[in-house]
Amino acid sequence: MSKISIVAVKFCFLFILYLGVSFIIKKINVVPAGTVAAVVAASVTVFLGEFFFKLFKCAR
């Protein structure tokens, strides 16, 4: 797995998360939801990053 593809995968996940979070914020339409969504997105991103890193390591 090259570094470029790993970065591309992470970018795709961040973009999908960003779309999902912005959609949720629009649905809720509450100011503190932005902070909550940012924290959730960060933790989910870290979790997905760890998960796929282990997955790619096992795939080798």
Image: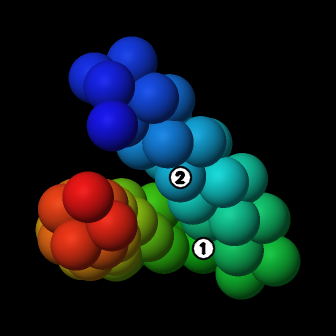
Q: CA distance from mark 2 to mark 1?
A: 24 Å
Q: In the orientation shown, which residue stands out farthest toward the bottom?
A: 28
Query: Can you identify the residue that label 1 sits on?
Result: 30
Q: Residues within 10 Å of mark 1 (few under 14, many from 20)?
A: few
Instruction: Specify the quadrant that holds the C terminus.
Output: bottom left
Labels 2, 1: front one:
2
Residue at point 18%, 62% (across, down): 57
Q: Which mark is residue 40?
A: none
Compared across the picture, whether 36 is left or right of 11 comes to: left
Check the image and tell me how it is coloured: rainbow
Query: Can you identify the residue that label 2 sits on?
Result: 13
Q: Is residue 46 visible?
A: no
Question: Could you say whether the residue bearing mark 1 is in a helix, strand or loop?
Answer: loop
Q: In the orientation shown, which residue stands out farthest toward the top?
A: 4
The mark total stands at: 2
In the rendering, at what x and y percent does residue 49 appear? 27, 60
The three-letter code of the residue at mark 2 reads Phe
Residue at point 32%, 25% (across, down): 2
In the rendering, at what x and y percent does residue 5 appear? 45, 29
In the rendering, at what x and y percent does residue 47 appear? 24, 75
Nearest the viewer among 9 and 59 is: 59
Compared across the picture, whether 14 is left or right of 20 comes to: left
Q: Where 6 falls versus 43 (above or below)?
A: above
Q: In the orientation shown, which residue stands out farthest toward the front?
A: 60
First-in-chain label (2 vs 1): 2
In the rendering, at what x and y percent does residue 58 appear? 22, 72
Compared across the picture, whether 23 is left or right of 52 comes to: right
Nearest the viewer among 28 and 19 is: 19
Name the quadrant containing residue 39.
bottom left
Question: Could you say whether the residue bearing mark 2 is in a helix, strand or loop?
Answer: helix
Nearest the viewer among 51 and 13 is: 51
The three-letter code of the residue at mark 1 reads Val
